[in-house]
Every structure is written in structure tokens, then in C-alpha cells.
Amino acid sequence: MNEKGMSAFSFQNEAWQRFSNGYSGMVVAPTGFGKTYSIFLAVIIDFFNHPQNYKSGLKLIWVTPLRSLAKDLARAMQEAIDEIGLDWVVEVRNGDTDFKQKMRQTKNMPDILLVTPESLHLLLAQKEHQRFFKNLQCVAIDEWHELLSTKRGVMVELALAALKFENSKIKIWGITATIGNLDQALEVLIPDATKRTKVVAKEQKKIEILSVYPPEVEILPWAGHLGGKLVQEVVPIILNSKSTLIFTNTRSQSEMWYQLLLEAYPDFAGQIALHHSSIDANLRQWVEENLSSGLLKAVVSTSSLDLGVDFKPVDTVIQIGSSKGVARFMQRAGRSGHSPFETSKIYFVPTHSLELIEASALKEAVRLRIIEHREPFVLAFDVLVQFLVTLALGGGFYPDQFFPVIKNTYAFSEMTKDEWKWCIYFITQGGKTGKNYEEFHKVVPQVDGKLIVEKRKIGMLHRMNIGAIVSDSMLRVKFLSGGYVGMIEEYFISKLHKGDKFILAGRVLEYAMLKEMTVYVKSSSGKAITPSWLGGRLPLSSNLSFFLRKKLAESLSPNAREKELRFLHPLLANQNKFSHIPKEDEFLVEQIKTREGYHLFFYPFEGRLVHEVMAGLLAYRISKLYPISFSMAMNDYGFELFSDREIKLSEKDLHQILSKENLMQDVISSVNATEMARRKFRDIAVISGMVVQTMPGRQVNNKSLQSSSGIIFSVLEDYDPENLLLRQAYTEVFNQQLEEARFVRAFERISTSKIVYIFSDRFTPLSFPIKVDSLRQSLSSEDLATRIRKMQENNLKKKSRKE
């Protein structure tokens, strides 16, 4: 480093020193500050200082959440090693690695191996795998914050526990960006408190947030369309930058913006590209390489480029719409100005006027460095039983000997002895309901009590399904003439007819036919549908919702210093004139009567997932007061209950339905928790091996997976209600889908707030975007635009009559 005129940061020196003193730990530093080198070089420095500790074979395992990160990291590490003059070899092992290379690695491991969590488990599933790890010095977990709150994070915890059991000298080091619960993240990664340390960079990345303003403020905003109008403002930003990353929140939004930019500035053809997880891996790799080399002027991307290699030419980032979270926004901002001494510049492009309040909220959250927590996943028994079969396949284990090993992980620290016995019973006998079916008897106890997998077929199927992640069924898209385009979801294709056109990977494609799990298409042109992907919209984080409420409350203050709030003054004044802007200790409810019927709007500002559950709960509570049915719509700011019958709700009734009393009992009554758990159980059944997703030569489609797991769910409900996997399905529904903890906090806040109940005959700036979202589900884009224009005109007529 000194030869190149570079000097180490203090946190890097600290990490090298702590590593050399025998510590395990976690490095926390902003993007672009050399977190990778703080651990990678620590191993090399330690080798030079203590060569006697380093034997031949694998010395460092580097676990990365994304395959795409591994290749560039390996190249950078190998270049550094070659410059130093070491004869160490760096290699990658994941699903993209050639079979011959894997076989060669099995015989002779490299010095440094980059893997995903799934690849690490596959290594542990090999017989006599201990020989791979006997001289291992360190396991590094990259982007730990991304893995922490997922089942893949639990996979990492279990793998580390097994490796430490076999070789207690291994050091564990995590690398993470800043998150709100750093101490907990360290405890999850390294549960053993002895010789555990946290190294935090004192240096902070400078971030400049620049909002892009429309020519005029919309008094009645609606989500989505404004972003398209602002494309003319975005083109000069790209032209004036060296290289630009344009982040969107959904794949459909990225496809749309790629087309918008080409239409607005045709000379971008060949200079801009598209990147998201449904595009062919080879094309994604081409985009990443050409972005790194500076040949591409701009790339439109989803979160697929949130993490990863340093794209040094990138000096500007553009965020289309709200990032919905502070941490995600900072991560994306850090992709520009990658030198530690450069300022990361990020432009915020709103997709409707109100999102400018989110820009203001983000600025304050970033200034105060208030970042979201990542909650660790606990008691994921589906991952545990899968792992126990992995251990049984990789040479076997003794249950009594391994119980304290698993119990020592954060994920299973609360596991009881009875729950452990149930897991052993499940892998050996299939549980209470599987004992009569031989295919569920995967693991066989030996005379000495050791548990191993005896049948070759069970071992083969298990290896094929390790780390199976169930998502909405993805279909391959190929040209009739040959050539792979990417992936599309089954539910989207099911709506198309032969000859229909859709956009994927920036191309207009004509649907020809669906055969097995492949969609065949022809190249086309003209107008086409942009696909939507299920689970597309990110929910608003609790941190950002807090600042959003705060900024909204400040918005009419004459001292509002943010330009965004001053720009929105006409809209906010309109909201205040015909309704109300809630203060931080107030909760706004609007009842609006229109020609269509009666609308009840609530504004918790807690994100669409919480609002979805809240809407169902309040509809249920109102129906208990008197018989009435509602249709529902929601966005991140609030939700609507709509009925063609008059809504008779007094202030006393309103306080009653917003009560925190009997909260979760009423939630269970208002949602079909059993049906939600049934759908959750599909994932759990696949991960635990009760249902097999990948078979030799074929992939089982989601319809079949749902059907098979649904039958098992019903059997367990009737005959084995204490089954841990069944219990887990309900727990996941409440913790993730219903966000129980956040939901309860929201009602506690509402219970201490002053409820402001407003009656109106027109839509307000806060209610209008929610109403539009409800119309999207039933109208085409052209019909929707016409309907919205009429609604806006009606509101203006009412306003002029009143004045």
C-alpha cells in the first residue's frame, strides 16, 4: 500500500492488530473505505508474523451473500497476493463454478475460497469434510447486515458452530455497513464472548442529497406517474456525470425507466444498460464489467447492485422514488464517489409530490445517523432440521454431543431439550405423521448412537435442495430461435395470450407459447406491457416513518428550513385548508363522501404492510358495531375503507375501534391467520425437506409445491398440532407478515395521540394517492389516467364553488 502512495485507515490497522492478537470480531465501516482489506490483509499479515501456524490447504473462507460479488473479489484478492509475491491461490465455489473445478478443489483446496452460505453447507455435506478445514485460520462473513435478519443468516450461524466444533482455533470476522443494532449483530455472529471485538471506523462518508423538483407542485398527487414526467430533468444529470447508477425499487420500474430514458434521449442507445435479478446472469456480468471499465454512461438497476464490487467510475447515483429505508438509501448513495475522500452524490427523484417529504425525512435521518435495526432470525427449525441432515450426510454426528453446540448459537439459544429431541425424531422418523412413510426416515441411528444418512438417493436429493429458497415461481424466457433472455414470474405470464407483447431486459418480446417451465418469445417492437413482479413494493421502515411524521408536522412552520417542504407549501396548505396536517401527537382520520360512496381514511404513516393488517382489523371492529362491508386500499402513508353504504361512526366509536385493548385477539379474528400460515408453510416444508423442490433434471413448479405442502399442513393441523414446523409457520406470519411488534407500537402511539376526525366532500392531497392505488387494480393505465383527470377536475369544481 505504501508503494502505491496509500496509507491504511486507523480501523484497518486496529483490525490487523486485533486479528494478530487472536481476536474474532466485526469490522464496521462505510462503503468504499476498504472493509475487505481490513480482514483479507489481516490474514496475510498474520501469516508473515506467524508462518508456523499456517499449513498447506485452505486458510481463509470468505462467505458472500451474492454469487456476483465473488468473482470480482477473488480477482482483486489474487492481484494483491501476486503483487505481495505470495504463492497463494484464490478461487470461487458456488452454483456457477464448473463441475471439473469443484472436483479439483475437493482433492486439493486453494488457500482462499469464496463461497455463498449454501456452498459452505454443501462442503459440510461431503463425507470426510473435516480434511478441508483442518488448517483453516479464519472465516470472514461479508455484508453481514444483509444476512443477519434472514434464514441464510441462520445457515451461516449453524455452519460457523460446526466449524468451530471441529477446529476451535478458527477466527470468525464479520464485515458490515452501519446498522442500528451493531452489538446484537456481533453477538449473533460470535456468541462466545471471549476474545470478541468490534472495530468501528471513525471516518464517515460524506453524502450530498439533491432533490429533483418537478416544474410545478401537484395539489392532488398520485403515485408513479411523476417519475416519468421528470425524465427530462434526469437526462442532464446523466450527461453531466462520468458514470451514473439509477436505482429503482422494483424490476418493473427499472424496465420502465430504461425505456423512458431511451425515448427521451435516443443517443443513450448503447451507452446505458439494465440490471436486475430476472435478467440472464451472463448479461448482468457484461453490464457489471462495462460499468467497472467506464464504458457505460448509466445503468438502471434494482437492489441487485446495492452490494458488491467497487464501480470506481460511478460519480453519481439517482434514486427513483423513495428508498423506503435510511440504511438502504445510504448504501445506495455510497455506490458513488467510491474513494473515501470523495462526497457521495445522490439525486432523489420523486414519483409523486408527497415523496419530497420523504426526501426531507431522509436528509435528517442521514444527518443524525439514525439507521434501522436488522432483527436476527430465531428458532428457524426448518433450517435446523435441514442442517442436521447435512451433518448426518457429511460423516454423521452424535445428538447429545451436538445439542450444546447448536444451543450456543444465537438463533437457537432459547431452544429446549424437548424441541431438540423433536428435531432428532423428525429427521429419523419423520415426526408423528411421517413415521409410516419411509421417505421421511432420512437419518439412521448407528449402534453407537451416531446419526448418518445411509441411502444414496436421500443424500443426492438433499444436496440438490440445500439452501432452497422458495419464491414466486420463475419461468425461463427464451427466443423461439434460441437464446436466453431472463426470468419472469408465472403469475404474470398466466395473464398473457399468444401475440401479447411485454418488456424484459429492455427488449420488446412477443409471447408465443409456454412449454413446461419455459416461455418462448419472438423479438418485436411497438407498445408493450411492463411486467410486474409480486412482492415488488418495499415497505416503509419504522425509522423513516418516524421522520416522515416529524417532517409533516413541521411542514407548515414558517421556520421550515428544507427546500422540499417550502416547495410543497401549496399542496400542504391545501391539505390544511380542507382537512388537517397532523402534529406529532395527533392521529388524523378523514371521512369523505363522494358520488361513488363513503370513504374512511386513516393515516398512521407505518408502511403498507402494517396498514394492510390495520385496515382488516378496523373493518372487522366496525362490522361488530353494525353490519357493513368495505373494500380496502393502502399506501405507505395511510389506508382507505370504502363502502357504498353510509359509514356511521361517531367520535366515541372511532376511539373504540382504535383501541389497543384485545389487539392481537382481534387481529387473529380479522385476518385468515390459518390461510396465511398455510402459504408460509410452503417455504418451511421445502426448506425442511418435507416437500422436494428440485428433482434430477426438473424443477417442481410452485402450484405443485403449494398443493403438496397444503395437504401436509392440513394433516398436521388435524393430527399433530404441536409440530414445531407448523408452529413456526404461525410465528413467521405474526413476526414478519403482520409485523406484530411494530403493529403493537403503532397502536400504543395512537392511544396516546389526539384523534382528529375530519369530514369532507372532496379528496385531500393525503387521501388522493390512496384512492388512485385502489383504482389501479381494476383499470388499464389509459383508463386510469382518464379517471384520475376527472376526479381532479371534480375536486377543482368543488373548490371554486366553495370559494
Image (spheres, helix red, strand yellow):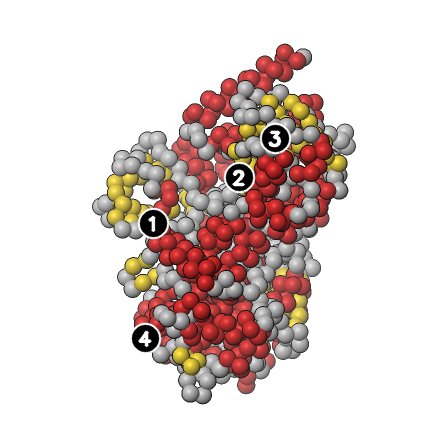
Q: Residues within 10 Å of mark 2 (few under 14, many from 20)?
A: many
Kindly identify the amino acid type of the residue bearing the numbered disc 2. Answer: Ile
Viewer-nearest residue: 793 or 81: 793
**Where on the picture, by quarter, is residue 57?**
bottom left
Please tell me the numbered disc located at residue 320. 2
**Circle 3 is placed at which residue position?**
600
Label 3 near label 2: C-beta < 8 Å? no
Where residue 769 sits in the image (x, y, percent)?
56, 31
Label 1 near label 2: C-beta < 8 Å? no
Which label sits in the foreground, 2 or 4?
A: 4
Q: Earlier in the sequence, mark 2 or mark 4?
A: 2
Viewer-nearest residue: 606 or 529: 606
Where residue 80 sits in the image (x, y, percent)?
50, 67
Identify the residue at the far left of this view: 481
For image coordinates 53% across by 81% down, the residue present is 400
Label 4 near label 3: C-beta < 8 Å? no
Q: Residues within 10 Å of mark 1 (few under 14, many from 20)?
A: many
Q: Earlier in the sequence, mark 4 or mark 1?
A: 4
Kindly identify the amino acid type of the residue bearing the numbered disc 3. Answer: Leu
Kindly identify the amino acid type of the residue bearing the numbered disc 4. Answer: Arg
Distance in Å between CA atoms under marks 2 and 3: 30 Å
Q: Is residue 747 left or right of residue 92?
A: right
In the displayed structure, would residue 113 be above or below residue 592? Answer: below
**Circle 1 is placed at which residue position?**
475
Which label sits in the foreground, 4 or 1?
A: 4
Q: Earlier in the sequence, mark 2 or mark 1?
A: 2
Image quadrant occupied by the N terminus: bottom right
**Is disc 1 placed on a helix, strand or loop?**
strand
Q: Earlier in the sequence, mark 3 or mark 4?
A: 4
Distance in Å between CA atoms under marks 3 and 4: 61 Å
Q: Earlier in the sequence, mark 2 or mark 3?
A: 2
